[in-house]
Image: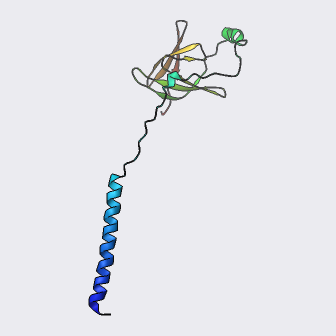
């Protein structure tokens, strides 16, 4: 074989590869991803239920109320805020306006303290998270 035929073969292979790469690039441009809308429910629409009946113990606990919750985490804002509290081996997530164990309503959250209210009384927890 002479040198001109070898050059033509190499050139033909390069042209074929260039055509294949161009076709692949064009296909990738027109192949758009299928984006689906995800509907995430609002946390306030989710109702958490407990399988433990605490109604019989509520009279005993109402006379001996201990507000000894430990603040694990918080998210503060002017209108939307929430906290994560721990008491014993139970953890509670409470959002703005929700009630902790059906008794204490979350009123405010800021960098210094978390404020709950129950029957006109305010209960404050010092915020030492991240400090």
Q: Position of residue 98 (x, y in %)?
A: 52, 17
Q: Is residue 10 above or below residue 106?
A: below
Q: Is residue 38 visible?
A: yes
What is the total number of numbered labels drawn onto the structure image?
0
13 above or below 96?
below
Q: Quadrant of residue 49?
A: top right
Quadrant where the N terminus lies?
Answer: bottom left
61 left or right, relative to 7 = right
Residue situated in front as seen by the camera: 52 or 114: 52
Q: Left or right of 61: which side holds 117?
A: left
Say which residue appears at 64% left-offset and 13% top-offset: 65
Query: Percent x, y for residue 44?
Result: 50, 22
User: In the image, what residue occupies the spot 33% across and 60% down?
Assistant: 25
Q: Is residue 128 left or right of residue 24?
A: right
Visible in this render: residue 126?
A: no
| Residue 96 or residue 33, whichever sits in front | 33
Q: Is residue 122 left or right of residue 25?
A: right
Q: Is residue 106 above or below residue 21?
A: above
Residue 11, how many percent across, how many down? Answer: 29, 79
Residue farthest along the left direction in this orientation: 4
- Indicate the position of residue 94 as horizontal and vertical percent values: 53, 22
Q: Residue furthest top?
A: 120
Residue at the (34%, 67%) spot, across then down: 20
């Amino acid at each position: 074989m002479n040198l001109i035929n070898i050059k033509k073969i190499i050139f033909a292979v390069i042209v074929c590869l260039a055509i294949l790469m161009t076709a692949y690039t064009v296909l990738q441009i027109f192949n758009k991803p299928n984006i689906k809308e995800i509907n995430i429910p609002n946390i306030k629409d989710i109702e958490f239920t407990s399988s433990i009946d605490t109604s019989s113990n509520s009279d005993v606990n109402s006379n001996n109320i201990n507000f000894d919750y430990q603040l694990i985490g918080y998210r503060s804002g002017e209108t939307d805020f929430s906290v994560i509290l721990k008491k014993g081996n139970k953890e509670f997530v409470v959002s703005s306006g929700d009630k902790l164990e059906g008794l204490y309503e979350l009123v405010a959250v800021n960098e210094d303290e978390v404020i709950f209210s129950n029957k006109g009384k305010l209960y404050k927890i010092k915020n030492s998270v991240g400090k």
